[in-house]
Structure formats: structure tokens, C-alpha cells
Amino acid sequence: MKAALVDGSGTISALERIRTPHDGERTADAVLAAVAGTAERFALEHPEVVPVAAGLLVPGHVDDESGVGILSENLHWRNVPFRDRLESLIDLPVVFSHDVRGAGEAEYRLGAAAGFSDVVVMAIGTGVAGAIFIGGTLYTGGGMAGEMGHSRVADGPACACGGIGCLEAVASASAIARRYNARTGASVAGAKEVLSRAQAGDPDAVWVWETALDALALDLSHTVALLAPEAIVIAGGLSQAGPALFEPLARRLDDILTFHRRPQLLRATIGEDAGVIGAALRARDLIASRELTT
């Protein structure tokens, strides 16, 4: 979890990283308590900043309009009214959205996606999801758009969502490490180590990395065929692989596409704090919209 306190000028006055409190079926309760505790601590430590709104972003299937976290397979919650519960805990208006949509909006307003009308911001980390902008407008599909991590790209392995061969189960940063460990009996900590082993000639690491790239290219080809974006901006931990990711991925995508528009493949530039920046932007939008209606 990341939390930021942003003052009236847009300056980040405080920024914290907090271990997500996993508590089985009560994880959502623990998360809300942690957010409320952080807000209280910020107020004590920074009395010069008086917040007027809060932004909360969570993963999984999210209904922005109702403020409900519909489902998170990884965090074990269903139909949690995050927005209403947090408003009652911190006594501030709260805007609520999906973590990747929020981070994607920061990238669209301030980062590598700026300047494009039709663009997809794709985050590849623990999971895989995207923020889709069509004609300069974020498209949410009732909270269901952008779940490219749960499109089928292979015959296996099983995914936490119940599907088989989902992109997230093959090519997310966590899946790359998990698949290598399952194949070799090793215990690498993450995709970075798998890539390092692949570059050193480890055949198992090469296989895992190459098949992940194949799956990503196939998924991106579907995105291109459906949406014809001008650019696809890749964010998240896997984007830190740099040329080792982007160059072979671009070649694979180009080999698949025929008459389609070739999107630019770009690395996100906002960085690991894009989510909290996007949450702050959304909170500001909420206050601005309320001021316009009063």
C-alpha cells in the first residue's frame, strides 16, 4: 500500500509505503483501518495541510460509480463498499477507483501517455490490467474494461480467477517467478532474477521469459486489433526490464500484426508513485466538480 498527503499546490508533503495487512476474508476491513490510521497520522504530523478530499484505489474488479470493490481474487474480498465506509471513517468525501485506472490517469495527464487521444496504459506487476483512453476519455466499461490480464493466451497454468492460461498467470512479474520456481524447484524472488538467469543462458529461465513475451505480444495484438491505439504505455514492475522487454516484445507484436496500426510501445514515466498521484488527481476532480454544482 502507498499513501500520500498532497497540499494545495500539488506538492507531496508526505509519502508512505505500508505492508498490505492480509487477514483472509477480513482483509478489506484491515485495509480500511490502515488507511484511516494513516490519515490520522498524517493529520498529526502535518497540521499545516488540511485535506478536503481523499482518493482510494484498489485492485480487482472495481465499480467506480457505486464505490464498491466487487472482487479481488488475490485479496479475498467481495462487494465491499469501500467509498462509503472510508468516508465514514475519515469524515471526508472520497473518490474511489481501480488502481490501474488511477495510475493510468496520472500517466495520461502527466506522463508518457500525454498527447495521445487513443492510448492504453498497461500495468504489469503482481497482476496485469490496463487503463483505456478512447478519444481522450477514460473508458471503464462499468468497471470491467481493461482486464487484459484475464484474457486467455495459453493452455495453462491455472489463474486465481478460475480461468486457464490467463495472461496474468503466464506473464505477470509474479507469474514469471512462480513459473520458473515450479519448473526448476528454485526459489527466485521475482522476475528480475529470472531475466538475469535467462541472460546468463539458463535454459529454463530463457523458456519462461520467452513464453511470457509470446503471451504478452499475443494479448497486445488483440488490444491493437480491437482498439487501434496510437500508443501502448507499459507500467509496473516488469517495465523496469527496459530494452530486454520492449525490444523483443515490439518484434513479436510486429510479426503478428498485418494491416493494423502499429502503436508506439512506450515505458511509463511517472514511476512507482503513479497510483497515489492518480488518486490525488481524482480527489481534486471530485472537489472541483462539487464546486461547479454549488
Image (cartoon, rainbow, N blue to C red):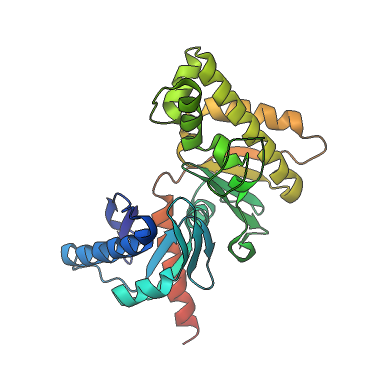
Please tell me which residue lies in front, 40 or 266.
Answer: 40
Report the front residue among 8 and 140.
140
Please provide percent x and percent y for residue 180. Answer: 49, 25
Q: Count the labels in the image.
A: 0
Q: Quadrant of residue 149?
A: top right
Regarding residue 87, the answer to whether it shows in the image is yes
In the visual, does 3 lie left or right of 232?
left
Is residue 178 positioned above or below 129 on the image?
Answer: above
Above or below for 65 versus 25: below
Q: Position of residue 58 (x, y in %)?
A: 44, 58
Q: Position of residue 176 (x, y in %)?
A: 50, 31
Q: Quadrant of residue 209?
A: top right
Q: Residue at x 25, y 61 (%)?
A: 38
Tell which residue pokes out farthest to the top in this image: 201
Q: Is residue 6 visible?
A: no
- Tell whether 249 sits left or right of 104: right
- Residue 220, compared with residue 135, is above or below; it is above
- In percent of the image, x 26 and y 71: which residue is there? 50
Residue 145: image quadrant is: bottom right
Residue drawn at the location 69% of the way across and 47% of the way down: 229
Name the residue rendered at 51%, 29% in the picture. Answer: 179
Specify the farthest residue to the right: 259
Residue 275 is left or right of residue 41, and the answer is: right
Q: Nearer the viewer, residue 54 or 261?
A: 54
Residue 187 at what x, y percent from top left?
A: 39, 26
